[in-house]
Amino acid sequence: MDVQRSNLDDVRDILEGLKKTAEGTVLHGFIARGLRKFGDTRVEAAFLAFAGKLLERYLSNPLSDPGTRVRVKVIQQRLRPYIEETAELLQAAEPAVATPEPVPVETPSPEVVTIEARTENPAPAAEGAVDTLPEHLARQMAHTLTRGRELDDLLRTSLAALNSGGDMAALKEQLARGIEELLDEHREIERQVATANQEMQTLHEDRRQLATALDRARKNSLTDELTGLPNRAAFLRQLEAEIGRARRYGFSLAIAILDVDNLKDLNTRHGFAAGDAVLHTYASQVMALFRGYDMVARYGDDEFAVLLPNTQKDGATRAMEKAQKQAAGLSVHFEGHNIPLPSFSSVLTLYTHGEAPEAILRRADEALSHAKQRGRAQAVFALSAA
């Protein structure tokens, strides 16, 4: 007994070398717990043999950590005399009892460590790394969970085999207690993996909702919330595109800006809600008269802008007169009152080859500002300085 205890102390010292890696620490924990729990000579011998086979099983796993594999090989060489000696003692003490088949405990423990190691430097994704990372982790977790259930079945089978015989009652009781402890630890691992899997799925759903919200925000950033028309940013973007087409193909391009007359006074008398109703009516019933391929946008607080591709001065003038006539016949029903739709003043200009968008808009704004000083329902044409 004393000799064996001295041998076990030597074995424990040798096994300390496993703790130098993360996976080796997990493997050391399984072996050390078994060596601590048993005091009978035959049981100690059985567990030394069990430890040797457990190390062999770890080496046979291709997914094992390379650094730990090297340490296990060195430890095997140092343990060989002790394992051979205890195997002979075990066989002499009870020839009919075979050494318990080592349970493949490397499956859950190294797998959990491997998940952490693999996710520190995830493989680059083509696009949307925020998307692929949680999905990859979720698949890893689910795979580990499946392999964990297989381990559970193996442990339960081993436990049933130990409980089926009548010999070596102390060995059976202590081994059964050790395997039950492994089962409890496995169930805790399974619970943690299932929780992590659910968290990864939740992260994926959150990412999907975020992507949807960002897409909606991008669309809204080019749309006026009140009228539903494209906003100033969208108009400026389209203006550059139309100028590019006019430059390439020699098309004409007309630009119009409409300013609703005295909208500030209407807001003062009836409130901003009434002013919003006026702008909404303009968008839905006046600006809707322009052609389908004309670009109509809300340009400012009380201004609208229109791009009329492939349109000369006469065609653009007729379109503006038609819009003015439409506005003159409309009213806004607001809080029990019919408010006549205010008139608008407008400016028309044409793109001149080589002219920058900023120059066109500056010329139009200045002409419209001077026109409004003369009164309501003004219509002017701003010629290029070139």
Image (cartoon, helix red, strand yellow):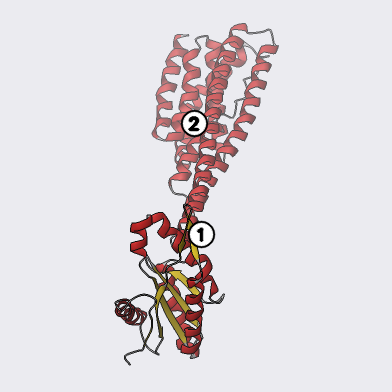
Pointer 1: what residue? 126
User: Which residue in the rendered view is the most extreme toward the right?
Assistant: 164
Report which quarter residue 345 is drawn in: bottom left
**Of 4 and 56, which appears nearest the observer?**
56
Report which quarter residue 101 is drawn in: top right
**Taking 161 as reference, is 346 left or right?**
left
Q: Amino acid at mark 1?
A: Ala
User: Which residue in the rendered view is the most extreme toward the bottom?
Assistant: 386
**Of 151 and 379, which appears nearest the observer?**
379
| Residue 104, x across and y down, in percent | 59, 30
Residue located at (67% from left, 21% from top):
157
Q: Residues under labels 2 and 1: Cα distance? A: 44 Å
**Of 268 and 302, which appears nearest the observer?**
268
Looking at the image, is 203 positioned above or below residue 12? below
Looking at the image, is 131 positioned above or below residue 46? below
**SS under mark 1:** loop
Please identify the quadrant where the C terminus is shown. Answer: bottom left
**SS under mark 2:** helix
Label whose residue precedes the other's in the sequence (2 or 1): 2
Pointer 2: what residue? 76
Q: Amino acid at mark 2?
A: Gln
User: Which residue in the rendered view is the most extreme toward the front?
Assistant: 337
Looking at the image, is 132 positioned above or below residue 114? below
Residue located at (48% from left, 45% from top):
118
| Residue 204, x across and y down, in percent | 52, 45
Report which quarter residue 25 is drawn in: top left
